[in-house]
Image: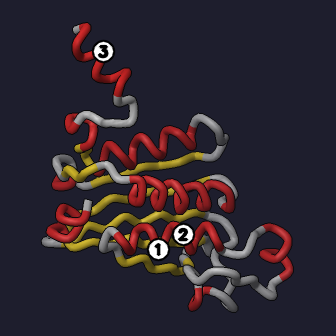
Amino acid sequence: CSEILKKISNEPTKRDNFFKKIKLKDLLDETVKSFENISDKKINFYWNKNTEDLKINRSLEITYGLRNFIGNAVKYSRSIVNVNLQKEEENIKIKISDDGPGFSEDIIEILGEPYIRSTNSYFTNKSGLGLGTFIGKTLLSRKKAAVDFENCKKTEGAIVIIKWKVDQLEASS
């Protein structure tokens, strides 16, 4: 024990490989719970059974990207955020949706670019320059993810879809 404690104190930033691997479902659950602790909004997390054993290396890029998009959904939602993890054949998809105002139509095509600003006064007063979205998308893209933005026709809220090929996610993390 003293040898392990000595090693930890001499190398505090070195992480044990045991803690580096994480189930993607658990990483999302951990992220959702962190927002539930600071928000009164209802955050639902769904997953299908075949995603339960999907393990990835915990990375700052994936963690930050997911936190950014879930955090934005919580910020802009009226009351509900849904996070849905699915595995379909060789694809992994995380869909984050909310019941907020959605994305402004004048910027939806360029979301993920830095320094953008909507001409819609509602969004101009409530949002920044898109840097968080730019950073989140860039970090996830570095881990081989495709990130798409949509508006939900049913709730009028925003939808962010993060997709990987299973083999690319496992190889890039």
What residue appears at the point 60 percent right and 86 percent down from the top-left corner? 108
Asked if one can make out residue 153 in the rendered structure from this viewpoint, the answer is no
The quadrant the N terminus occupies is top left
Query: Would you call the spot at circle 3 few (<14 residues within 10 Å), some (14-19), or many (20 or more)?
Result: few
Q: Residues within 10 Å of mark 1 (few under 14, many from 20)?
A: some
Nearer the observer, 116 or 70: 116
Residue at 62% over, 54% down? 74
Of badges 1 and 3, the one in the foreground is 3
Q: Which residue is mark 3?
A: 5
Secondary structure of the residue carrying numbered label 2: helix
What is the quadrant of residue 91 in the picture? bottom left
**Can you see residue 25?**
yes
Quadrant assignment, res 105 = bottom right
Q: Residue at x 41, y 60 (%)?
A: 61
Could you classify mark 2 by the number of other residues whose Cα lies within 10 Å: few (under 14), some (14-19), or many (20 or more)?
Answer: some
Q: Position of residue 118 (x, y in %)?
A: 75, 84
**Label 3's element?**
helix
CB-based contact (under 8 Å), mark 2 and mark 1: yes
Residue under pointer 1:
138
Quick one: label 2 or label 3, which is nearer the N terminus? 3
Left or right: 146 as drawn, with respect to 57: right
Question: Which three-letter amino acid code belongs to the residue tagged 3?
Answer: Leu
The image position of residue 151, as x and y in percent, is: 56, 79
> Which of pointers 2 and 3 indicates the residue nearer the eye?
3
Q: Which residue is under mark 2?
A: 135
81 with respect to 117 (left or right): left
Residue 12 lies, in percent from the top left, at 39, 29
> Is residue 93 shown left or right of residue 111?
left
Comparing 170 with 48, the one in front is 170
Residue 48 — which label?
A: none
Determine whether 132 is above or below 149 in the image.
Answer: above
